[in-house]
Image (spheres, rainbow, N blue to C red):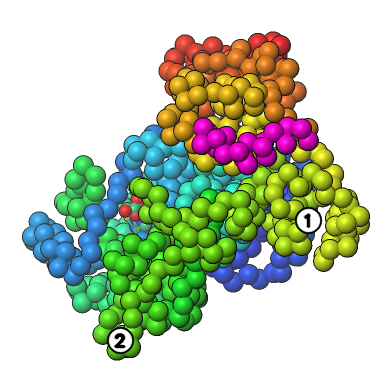
């Protein structure tokens, strides 16, 4: 093939793939199988690899994500990204209509749309190509997240047809559908991370990730709802968005043109009910004056357009029967009452359990077993009981007696001043507390023991192989390989994992001990401040407070921990077993050379990855931040640093150092 034939094939493949992408992600009506699609993509990838001169950042092969960034650059919005005024009732809404119609002295048409509950984005297209995507930020300036946005398959990289304006910004909402949200949360829980509270947080967290490859793996979607341009030729918003659909954008077909207030109210009540069948979250409806000239006449306040308003739905509620209440005991002994409900459909999922928070909440609402209760799903994914329909209560019903003893170990519960929850004080004898502490000890951010999961902890504890953390270190492969679901290989892995954990640094051990308020970061500061466990045990409150970031509350908690003889003995036993109870020689000698210095990492490096460089900075007492400011001490710059970043650094007079110069600093 000649070079021009190759170029032609590449162009044809790109066009073809873009079309199938559009059919699959925007139209939801694919014409080819996933396998056939992958074949096309592979063919294009091969051609591009062999002919790098035809590479293009807009090729569909680039949707998998580019280099990892160390921080986002900021960009200005050409037109500010405003928010919307909110209404919550028909009365508020009528006021909006009256106000609007008085100003423009006519009854306009309105476009009604769904109010998507995600993250706002503004995407710039020049000559039909996606050039930039910026988050809302403060409305005037946001993070440039172009590479992440390019991984969203429903967003066109190049536009279809040739009717689009030469240059425009289109705005919309990046969403995470419920299905991807659930998968990602399962993954996060397995990896020892906190789950995202709701799809909006998940979408926003994902968009701010520095590695576009991870973003590509999370299935985001994007609904477009606004054209911002000086050169839109259409007369109305509805038309502009309908035309945008023909350029390849996912403009929701739920959008309606309404001529009367009644039609608008019908639209609202239809979606208030129907939203439970949508695959993603919406939290209301947006109503916009349709005609651009009328919009201009109405103008803007400092924060919101006067030509649009949102109507927010009430949080979804359902009435269902409270069958029973069970009580969960956490790692710290805190008791959480949980409602077991007659299963009910709520916001797209079936709810069987809901949080009751604590005894006070139950008493305030006078919640009783067999009551018909209102269950609500707010922005959060864990539903809660918010009230009782007392008209449906049976005469025989009696007030709930909150438990007074622990459901797991029968110990009398206590209440701690300032805490809403009851606690089981039997720290050393209450099974879920012990198991919880062991699970924390083995978790990834603590001792990171490979080969043991939460279920293995349950099994080993229930079979009496371990009764506290220290027992992990006397397990033997022959004993445990006969356990249900174990076998030679997993027993071996477990023992190796336990042995390997002895190499974990002092800071991880401190975190793993499970001292209240000593999280991962505090543990690092503490390790550096005290240098070894013996001096930590010997320190008094005043000495502890001297350490960077240790306040009164943390200091008291540490003192309490070691004042407890069992915990102190357990710690000393771990030391005897061979866990690292002091800073390593190198940590000791060099730990402070970067103290007080703040670094921003950018570009690509030869010897270390960015993550490794970050670890080195922290190890030597420095701090890594993601954006450049006056407080930045050094820009640690690799190859391929963007010109905008360099300009900013030079303007602020920040020192730029190379990888080697940095390594010299810590050597
Ligand atoms: S129009 C100038 N339309 O709601 C008007 N916004 O509370 C710009 N939103 O920041 C916004 N769905 O993130 C518009 N159909 C829709 C929307 C929508 C969700 C978000 C958007 C905005 C926020 C305001």
Give the quarter of the image for residue 167: top left
Q: Which residue is mark 1?
A: 465
Q: Give the mark nearest the N terminus, 2 or 1.
A: 2
Residue 402 in the image: x percent, y percent?
40, 68
Q: Is residue 251 visible?
A: no
Q: Position of residue 619 (x, y in %)?
A: 64, 23
Q: Is residue 510 visible?
A: yes
Residue under pointer 2: 392
Looking at the figure, which quarter contains the C terminus? Answer: top right
Q: Residue at x 48, y 60 (%)?
A: 412
Percent coordinates x, y for residue 38 in the rendering: 74, 59
User: Within 10 angstroms of label 1, few (less than 14), some, or many (20 or more) residues?
Assistant: some
* Magenta stretch in the rendered image: 558-577
Badge 2: residue crowd in 10 Å (few <14, some 14–19, many ≥20): few
- The reply to whether the magenta stretch includes residue 559 is yes
The residue at the point 30 percent across, 86 percent down is 392
Tell me where residue 17 sits by quadrant.
Answer: bottom right
């Amino acid at each position: 093939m000649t070079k021009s034939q190759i170029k032609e094939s590449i162009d044809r493949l790109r066009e073809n793939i873009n079309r199938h992408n559009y059919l699959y992600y925007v139209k939801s009506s694919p014409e080819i199988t996933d396998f056939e699609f992958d074949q096309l993509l592979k063919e294009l990838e091969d051609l591009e690899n062999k002919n790098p001169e035809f590479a293009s950042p807009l090729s569909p092969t680039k949707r998998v994500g580019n280099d990892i960034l160390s921080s986002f650059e900021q960009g200005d919005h050409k037109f500010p990204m405003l928010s919307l005024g909110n209404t919550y009732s028909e009365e508020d809404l009528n006021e909006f209509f009256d106000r609007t119609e008085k100003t423009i002295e006519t009854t306009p048409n309105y476009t009604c749309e769904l109010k998507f509950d995600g993250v706002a984005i503004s995407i710039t297209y020049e000559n039909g190509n996606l050039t930039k995507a910026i988050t809302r930020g403060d409305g005037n300036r946001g993070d440039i997240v172009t590479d992440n946005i390019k991984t969203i398959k429903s967003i066109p990289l190049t536009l279809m047809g040739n009717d689009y304006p030469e240059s425009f910004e289109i705005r919309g909402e990046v969403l995470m559908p419920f299905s991807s949200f659930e998968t990602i949360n399962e993954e996060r829980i397995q990896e020892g991370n906190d789950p995202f509270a709701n799809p909006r947080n998940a979408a926003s967290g994902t968009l701010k990730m520095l590695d576009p490859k991870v973003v590509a793996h999370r299935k985001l979607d994007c609904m477009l709802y606004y054209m911002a341009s000086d050169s839109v030729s259409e007369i109305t918003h509805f038309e502009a968005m309908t035309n945008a659909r023909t350029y390849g954008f996912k403009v929701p077909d739920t959008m309606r043109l309404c001529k009367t207030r009644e039609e608008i109210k019908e639209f609202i009540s239809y979606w208030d009910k129907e939203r439970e069948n949508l695959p993603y979250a919406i939290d209301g409806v947006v109503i916009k004056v349709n005609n651009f000239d009328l919009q201009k006449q109405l103008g803007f306040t400092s924060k919101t357009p006067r030509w649009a308003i949102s109507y927010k739905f009430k949080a979804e509620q359902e009435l269902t029967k409270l069958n029973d209440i069970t009580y969960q005991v956490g790692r710290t002994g805190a008791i959480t009452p949980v409602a077991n409900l007659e299963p009910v459909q709520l916001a797209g999922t079936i709810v069987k359990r809901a949080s009751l928070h604590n005894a006070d909440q139950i008493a305030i609402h006078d919640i009783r077993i067999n009551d018909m209760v209102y269950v609500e799903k707010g922005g959060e994914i864990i539903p809660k009981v918010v009230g009782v329909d007392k008209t449906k209560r049976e005469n025989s019903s009696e007030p709930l007696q909150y438990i007074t003893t622990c459901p797991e170990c029968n110990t009398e519960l206590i209440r701690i001043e300032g805490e809403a929850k009851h606690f089981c004080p039997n720290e050393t004898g209450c099974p879920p507390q012990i198991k919880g502490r062991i699970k924390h000890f083995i978790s990834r951010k603590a001792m990171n023991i490979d080969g043991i999961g939460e279920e293995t902890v349950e099994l080993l504890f229930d079979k009496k192989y371990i009764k506290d953390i220290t027992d992990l270190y006397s397990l033997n492969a022959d004993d445990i390989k006969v356990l249900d679901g174990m076998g030679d290989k997993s027993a071996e892995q477990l023992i190796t994992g336990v042995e390997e954990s002895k190499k974990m640094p002092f800071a991880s051990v401190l975190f793993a001990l499970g001292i209240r308020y000593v999280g991962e970061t505090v543990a690092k500061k503490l390790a550096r401040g005290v240098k070894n466990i013996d001096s930590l045990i010997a320190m008094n409150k005043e000495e502890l407070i001297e350490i960077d970031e240790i306040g009164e509350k943390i200091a008291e908690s540490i003192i309490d921990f070691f004042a407890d003889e069992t915990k102190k003995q357990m710690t000393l036993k771990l030391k005897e077993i061979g866990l690292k109870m002091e800073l390593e020689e190198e940590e000791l000698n060099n730990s402070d050379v970067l103290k007080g210095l703040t670094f921003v990492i950018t570009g690509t490096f030869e010897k270390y990855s960015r993550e490794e460089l970050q670890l080195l900075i922290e190890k030597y007492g420095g701090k890594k931040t993601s954006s450049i400011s006056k407080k930045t001490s050094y820009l640690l710059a690799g190859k391929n640093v963007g010109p905008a970043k360099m300009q900013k650094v030079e303007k602020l007079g920040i020192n730029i150092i190379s990888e080697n110069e940095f390594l010299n600093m810590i050597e």
